[in-house]
Image: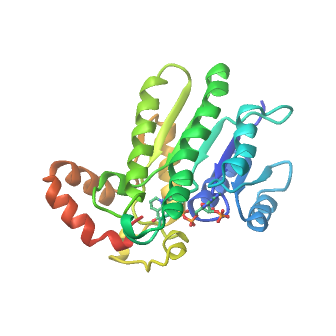
Amino acid sequence: MTRPTALVTGASSGIGTEFAVQLAAVGHRLVLVARDEARLRALADRLGGDDHAEVLVADLADPASRLVVERRLAEPGDRPPVDLLVNNAGYGTAGEFVDTDLDVLAANHEVNVTTVLRLTRVALPGMIDRGHGGVINVSSVAGFLPGRGSVYGAGKAYVTMLSQNLAGVLGGTGVHVMALCPGFVKTEFHQRFGRARSGPGFAWMEADRVVRDALADFAKGRPVSIPSPLYKTIVVAARLAPPRLVHAVARRTASGRG
Ligand SMILES: NC(=O)c1ccc[n+]([C@@H]2O[C@H](COP(=O)([O-])OP(=O)(O)OC[C@H]3O[C@@H](n4cnc5c(N)ncnc54)[C@H](OP(=O)(O)O)[C@@H]3O)[C@@H](O)[C@H]2O)c1
């Protein structure tokens, strides 16, 4: 039997590296995508070298650079087709919407939203034709909490809803789509936009646990994965509480958003 192939964006760090490691451990070949070529090559070596991991260097904020990834998904040629796409690359921006440079906001939207839309759209037809495959879109609990940050939570709300919609539409095709919505995870995410890790220690999860829970939920066919009872409770409470209260609480904790 041929080994399945998984393409992971943002594989150079944090949750993406953990997806690559755990998927390799259960027999996947990997296609590793990010900007930092040295880190991707080091990870490819760790996973066993060229037979086990391809490296695709791409800036997902740049449509021309991103085309390399779109082509790898849509037209694999003599390379193995991608069975599992993990849209994981993403980042937050500091500052309020009206104070943040338009190009900074647009680049963030390109990576966190447009890339998820485009890569999912180009990957799905081949998976549907083959009758199997899947997409895991790394979203966030921030997508359930209005008032957190400027565009980050809005983008994640889109990613969660897109994934849920596709999970419903694709029922019976053999292809599954799931949104992974973590809370705070110990990665480089916060330091990249100058945020200290805030809040109680128990709220911070390890990336390996998040990915383990996500892969278990994906195997069960769940449309949304929210790792840990704490964050499941927060999401349910946010849905039940009056919107003005959710907004006020979320704004008070927005400095540590994840
Ligand atoms: N950590 C949290 O608390 C948390 C909570 C909820 C959701 N999330 C989500 O989890 C996902 C992974 O984040 P993380 O926590 O693992 O953060 P991280 O350690 O900072 O990793 C982010 C990854 O995204 C890649 N990336 C960023 N901009 C890119 C670009 N323009 N082109 C290509 N790749 C790019 C980075 O690679 P290069 O720099 O090499 O390009 C890196 O591999 C994100 O979607 C994030 O929104 C994180």
Residue at image x 58%, y 37%?
120
Residue at image x 42%, y 64%?
258
Residue at image x 74%, y 38%?
71
Query: In the rendered view, does 182 fall on the left or right side of 212?
Result: left
Depth check: give the residue in front, 96 or 131.
96
Which of the 4 image quadrants contains residue 204?
bottom left
Whole-percent x, y for residue 86 in the image: 59, 46
Query: In the rendered view, does 228 fall on the left or right side of 24?
Result: left
- Number of labels in the image equals 0
Query: In the rendered view, does 42 fall on the left or right side of 62?
Result: right
Residue 28 in view, yes or no: no
Whole-percent x, y for residue 37 in the image: 77, 63
Which of the 4 image quadrants contains residue 148?
bottom left
- Position above or below: 209 against 173: below
Whole-percent x, y for residue 110 in the image: 55, 51
Whole-percent x, y for residue 192 in the image: 54, 73
Residue at image x 72%, y 65%?
36
